[in-house]
Each structure stands twice: as C-alpha cells, then as structure tokens.
Amino acid sequence: MKGIYDHFSSRPNDFEHFAADLVKIHLPTVVSLDVTRRSRDGGRDAIGLLQVGTGGGDILLDFSMEAKCYKPGNSVGVRELSRLISRLRHRQFGVLVTTSHLDGQAYKELKEDRHPIIVIAGGDIANIVTASNLPGAAGWKAWLNKTYPPLS
C-alpha cells in the first residue's frame, strides 16, 4: 500500500476518485457512484447507489463513501469513523476506503454497534488489485500512472 499512498499522498481528491473505482470493482452491482466536490461535500467523499436483486424485484440502496489516504501504519480512528456514521441516513450504508487500517477501538465500536459500514483497508486493496487481472505489480503501476497521472 505504500506505493498507492505515495502516489496519492499529496492529491487527496485524486485518491477519492481512485477509491470510488475500487468500490466499483469490489461491489460490481454499484450502478452509480459520484465523487462529491472538494468543499461542501456534506462529509462524504462520494455518494452512490447499489442494486440488490434483478428484474422487477430489484431495489437500489443509497450509500456514502469516505476515502482516507493514510500512510501505512497510521490508523483510521474513532473520530473519522464517527464522521462517516453520522452522515448516514435511514437505510443507508457506508463504505470506508483507506490505504491503512482501522485502529482497535474504531474496529471494536464498528462491530459491537453493528454499524452498516463496509471497510476496504490496505490488505483489501491489495486483494482487489490482485484479483483485477492486471499483469503483476508493473501492470498495476502502469494503470495507476495512466489513470491518475503523477503530478509534474
């Protein structure tokens, strides 16, 4: 995850777009996911719809995404998790994408209180990258540089 962190550490808005792409790969029934403006985003980095079911019996679920490009080893804490939870409305769920991990207390509260949050952390990102069928690390880095060009 250090490579992804290094690529986006000075460009948090680009990381939000990358995180949205990861969510679409991880949850293939996402029908829309729009990254919000940098300011006045209501505390959400993206908002989306997930389709559950097919045909006439399907439903669409609203969700919010929060993206945290943290240096590996720096955890996402209770404060950041609480901010996402507080933005969820009735019958919504959240997705937290981070290059790092949840700290112990945040994870404990998430599980004990059964908050409807999907966490895509550093290890999960690695698994998504591996499953994406890009040809090894070089293929992933080439895609990253092409899709989210480094700053000049």
Image: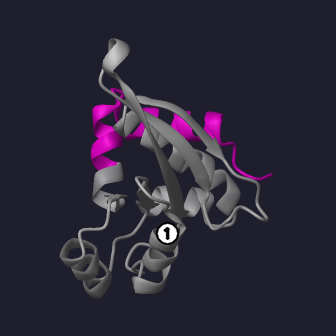
Q: Which residues are magenta?
A: 126-152
Q: Residue furthest top?
A: 55
Graded by Cα atoms within 10 Å as few (under 14), some (14 to 19) or many (20 or more), the crowding at tag 1 reads many
SS assignment for the magenta stretch, majority: helix
Task: Decide whether residue 139 is among the magenta residues.
Answer: yes
Front-most of residues 59 and 26:
59
Q: Is residue 28 above or below residue 91?
A: above
- Name the one closer to the observer, 73 or 75: 75
**Colour mode?**
one colour
Local secondary structure at mark 1: helix
Mark 1 highlights which residue?
Answer: 84
Instruction: Looking at the picture, tell me which residue is in the foreground, 62 or 118.
Output: 62
Kindly identify the residue that appears in the image at 34 percent across and 71 percent down. 101
Q: Residue 77: give x, y in percent of width and height.
A: 41, 83
Left or right: residue 105 versus residue 45 is left
Callout 1 amino acid: Leu
- Residue 16, position as x, y percentages in the image: 60, 53
Q: Up-down: is 124 above or below 82?
A: above
**144 on left or right of 81:** right
Q: Is residue 79 above or below residue 52?
A: below
Residue at image coords 77%, 65%: 40
Q: Position of residue 1 (x, y in %)?
A: 40, 59
Quarter-wise, where is residue 51 in the image? top left
Residue 5 covered by magenta stretch: no
Residue depicted at x 69% and y 43%: 149
Residue 130 falls in image quadrant: top left
Please state the horizontal and vertical placement of residue 12, each as a whole percent of the image: 66, 62
